[in-house]
Amino acid sequence: MCLILEGEVQRLLGVVETSTHTGLRDRALLGTLAYTFARIGAVVNLKVEDYYPSGKRFLLRFKEKGGKEKELPVHHKLEELLDEYLTGLGEEPGSPLFPAALGKTGKLSRRTLVRTDAADMLERRLSTVQI
């Protein structure tokens, strides 16, 4: 990742309000997109069990088009974001890693976040940052 992009990513992640579960989810989702370069559809389809340790590193297992699976090592900054987000959620392994929000309550549902809602969130977040 080039230095300019790294600074832009950190600036974007730094403006996300993290006092709610939704804010922590949004920051972790944006970090996952930025540090893995995965398709947004693959990211929103991740399950809690798809983020797992392997030796000293953590991996993310993506289910891609055509039923293919791809495992990627997790960047240490992304690992911090995901760990902070998942701490205290107590999610079951088969539940969505990035669930939808319950309205504007700041709480998360058990329903999977759809790709278009995630794209809208990304667009909203990007519009608040001068990059």
Image (tube, helix red, strand yellow):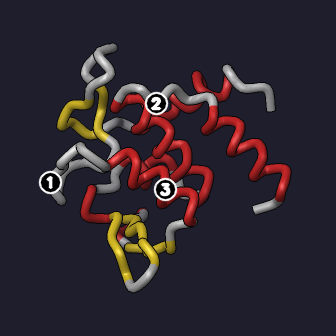
Q: Is residue 119 left or right of residue 49?
A: right
Find the residue positioned furthest to the bottom. Answer: 55
Residue at screen point 75% across, 62% down: 1
Under mark 2, the amino acid is Thr
Percent from the top left, x then y, of residue 6?
A: 75, 52
Q: Is residue 125 above or below residue 95?
A: above
**Which comes before the other along the chain, label 1 or label 3?**
3
**Which comes before the other along the chain, label 3 or label 2?**
2
Q: Is residue 63 above or below residue 15?
A: below
**Which comes before the other along the chain, label 2 or label 1?**
2
> Element under label 3?
helix
Q: Is residue 79 above or below residue 72?
A: above
Determine which residue is flagged by label 1: 92
Percent from the top left, x then y, of residue 44?
A: 38, 46
Task: Give how far apart the Cα atoms at labels 3 and 2 are.
Answer: 14 Å
Determine which residue is flagged by label 2: 18
Residue 115 position by quadrant: top left
Viewer-proximal residue among 60 and 90: 90
Q: Which disc, if any, is residue 113?
A: none
Percent from the top left, x then y, of residue 49?
A: 25, 64
Under mark 3, the amino acid is Glu
Q: Is residue 56 left or right of residue 51?
A: right
Determine which residue is flagged by label 3: 80
